[in-house]
Image (tube, rainbow, N blue to C red):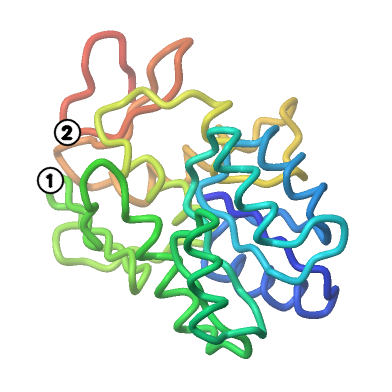
Amino acid sequence: MRLLVVEDEPVAAALLAKGLREHAYAVDVVGDGPAAIEQAEVNDYDLLILDVLLPGLDGLQVCSRLRADGITAPILMLTARGGPDQRVEGLDAGADDYLPKPYHFPELLARVRALLRRGPALASAVLTLDTLTIDTRARRVERGGRQIQLTAKEYALLEYLARRRGEVVGRSDIAEHVWDDSYDPMSNLIEVYIQRLRRKIDDGHPVRLLHTRRGAGYTLDVSDGEGAED
């Protein structure tokens, strides 16, 4: 999942982004309100973490503007002003959750996971497909009862495909949600990670789950469907 962190304090922003990347999230960082609006209108983020006290436009103004522009990605608002009145202001501006500073990073992660599970229907924290199990809270993956060791990026790719089970997901969608602004669209990085992931989750199992749809993208499903190849 790709997140936008909006924080004007460079050290705090860097620490938050580092912690999120270590938990398999792709993260972009900006330091002011206008840049946040520009980024959110250009990129399809899965979630925004938005500080209230920002130069240019404050977090409340940014949040209201994004909602008025039709951006529906969940917004987690952070602020040192953590009183009830401030929380009400943030929620009324369109935020989905509100976390006072200083925050406990595991709590922030839990709130991020909870917001990402929201949608038309509440998504489960544990994803299953055939004998494959993905525990999104522990970032633990098993198949047939055997734990599979994945890198942070391999895990992020697998979870993204699993949450879109049965859909054909193109390279552009994967790049948008699993990688950040540093991704080179001319590289073969996605193909490399798909091959690594396929070896780890499918080798030795009679049912293949990760399939390539020629000219279209990739799908994670028990049935590969017409036009798919392993």
Residue 113 in the image: above or below residue 171: below
Q: Position of residue 67 (x, y in %)?
A: 55, 42
Looking at the rendering, in which quadrant would you find the C terminus? top left
Mark 2 burial class by Cα count in 10 Å: few <14, some 14-19, many 20+: some
Q: Position of residue 34 (x, y in %)?
A: 82, 47
Q: Depth check: give the residue in front, 102 or 53.
A: 53
Task: Specify which label sits upstream in the sequence, 1 or 2.
Answer: 1
Identity of the residue drawn at 50% across and 77% down: 108
Looking at the picture, which amino acid does disc 1 mark? Asp
- Secondary structure at badge 2 equals loop
Q: CA distance from mark 1 to mark 2?
A: 7 Å
169 left or right of 103 in image: left
Tell me, for residue 176, which label it has, or none: none
Mark 1 burial class by Cα count in 10 Å: few <14, some 14-19, many 20+: few
Instruction: State yes or no: discs 1 and 2 in contact (Cβ < 8 Å).
Output: yes
Q: Position of residue 70 (x, y in %)?
A: 53, 33
Q: Position of residue 144 (x, y in %)?
A: 14, 59
Identity of the residue drawn at 53% across and 89% down: 104
Q: Depth check: give the residue in front, 164 or 30.
A: 30
Identity of the residue drawn at 69% across and 69% down: 52
Q: Quadrant of residue 136?
A: bottom left
Tally of numbered tags: 2
30 left or right of 217 in image: right
Looking at the picture, which amino acid does disc 2 mark? Val
Q: Depth check: give the residue in front, 120 or 56.
A: 56
Tell me, for residue 130, which label it has, or none: 1
Residue 195 in the image: above or below residue 57: above
| Residue on which the image places disc 2 | 222
Q: Quadrant of residue 97?
A: bottom left
Identity of the residue drawn at 59% across and 54% down: 3
- Secondary structure at badge 1 equals loop
